[in-house]
Image (spheres, rainbow, N blue to C red):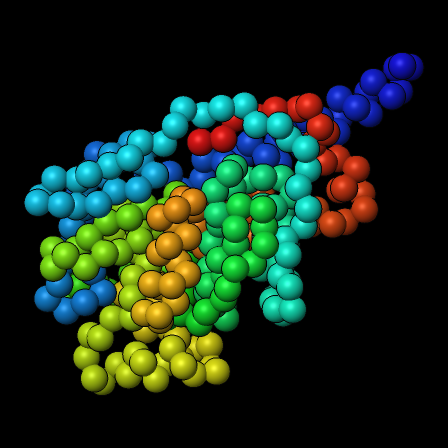
């Protein structure tokens, strides 16, 4: 192999490693032992105490029952296929991130969930990148991609309007229960950010009507949590996360996805040449 080929090969491998590794640790809670209390339901407080490296967590009798994630194992980096949306149309940002996740195996062996705040839509994919289903959702009232410091520890009545955001990022899905025994699917413990069944806070908010509206702006009403239609939550979202685990990608709305995830258009011919080669390995959490 001549020197030019060796240089090209090294360059491609370095580029691929940078694309894959950089976003893999985004949005991991900084203090996994901290407890949080917060909810979208009036008078109902979600309480949980995170444990490090937990795939699923449930609160029973005041003590968290957890199942630890297996130690990271080397995974062959044979490129996957682009995401399979079937006949479902989707915005460009959603398609780009889904393709990147599927081709680079950024989700490891887990299912993955994409939340598009701009259109207030949630997409559930199996580990191979095939779309299982999609649903409209309600998201944070305020536009923004970062959580305000301390907002996850505040009572709902203390939240300012600009604090009611659904932060963007890459998260490990976790199961939990609120103090009334109702289950939620945690996006981020530290920020008290969760996916749960459609909450009925007050009649004045008209949440049921909003989630059925074709106007995406009508879906901006929650305090930050993602409200999901009950039937979809019970038949698609919860079973998928319970059985397979999931990585959640909350797409940004004030910046490009690449800035948050390091995601690239993996279908572009020039970038396709820099995809990881079979036999190369990396570790996934």
**Which quarter of the rendering shows the N terminus?**
top right
Q: Residue at x 51, y 38 (%)?
A: 109
**Residue 82 at x, y = what percent?**
67, 50
Query: Of all residues shown, which one is farthest toward the left?
Result: 61
Q: Is residue 135 visible?
A: yes
The residue that appears at 74% across and 50% down in the rendered structure is 267
Left of 120 or right of it: where is 21?
right
Instruction: Tally the numbered discs.
Output: 0
- Quarter of the picture holding the C terminus: top left
**Image location (x, y in percent) of residue 30:** 31, 36
Above or below 272: residue 16: above
Q: Which quadrant holds residue 162?
A: bottom left
Looking at this view, is 252 or 97 the one in front? 97
Q: Is residue 31 above or below residue 98?
A: above
Residue 252 seen in render: no
Residue furthest toward the right?
A: 2
Residue displayed at 65% across by 69% down: 87
- Rendered location of residue 114, percent (x, y): 49, 56
Name which quarter of the figure residue 19 lies in.
top right
Q: Is residue 221 left or right of residue 71?
A: left
Q: Judge whether 202 appears above or below 128 on screen.
A: below
Does residue 164 appear to the left or right of 48 in the view shown?
right
Residue 215 locus on image (x, y percent):
47, 82
């Amino acid at each position: 192999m001549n020197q030019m080929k060796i240089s090209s090969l090294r360059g491609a491998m370095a580029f691929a490693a940078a694309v894959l590794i950089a976003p893999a640790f985004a949005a991991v809670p900084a203090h996994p032992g901290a407890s949080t209390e917060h909810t979208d339901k009036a008078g109902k407080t979600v309480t949980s105490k995170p444990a490090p490296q937990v795939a699923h967590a449930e609160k029973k009798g005041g003590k968290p029952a957890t199942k630890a994630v297996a130690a990271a194992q080397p995974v062959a980096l044979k490129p996957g296929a682009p995401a399979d949306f079937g006949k479902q149309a989707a915005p460009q940002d959603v398609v780009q991130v889904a393709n990147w996740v599927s081709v680079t195996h950024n989700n490891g062996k887990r299912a993955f969930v994409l939340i598009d705040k701009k259109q207030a839509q949630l997409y559930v994919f199996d580990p191979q990148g095939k779309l299982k289903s999609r649903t409209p959702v309600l998201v944070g009232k305020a536009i923004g991609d970062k959580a305000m410091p301390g907002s996850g520890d505040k009572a709902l009545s203390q939240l300012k309007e600009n604090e009611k955001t659904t932060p963007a990022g890459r998260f490990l899905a976790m199961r939990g229960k609120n103090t009334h025994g109702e289950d939620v699917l945690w996006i981020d413990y530290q920020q008290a950010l969760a996916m749960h069944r459609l909450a009925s806070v007050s009649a004045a908010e008209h949440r049921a009507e909003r989630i059925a509206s074709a106007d995406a702006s009508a879906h901006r009403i929650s305090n930050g949590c993602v409200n999901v239609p009950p039937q979809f939550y019970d038949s698609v979202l919860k079973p998928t996360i319970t059985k397979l685990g999931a990585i959640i990608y909350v797409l940004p709305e004030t910046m490009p996805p690449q800035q948050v995830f390091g995601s690239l258009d993996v279908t572009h011919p020039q970038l396709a040449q820099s995809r990881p080669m079979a036999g190369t390995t990396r570790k996934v959490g």
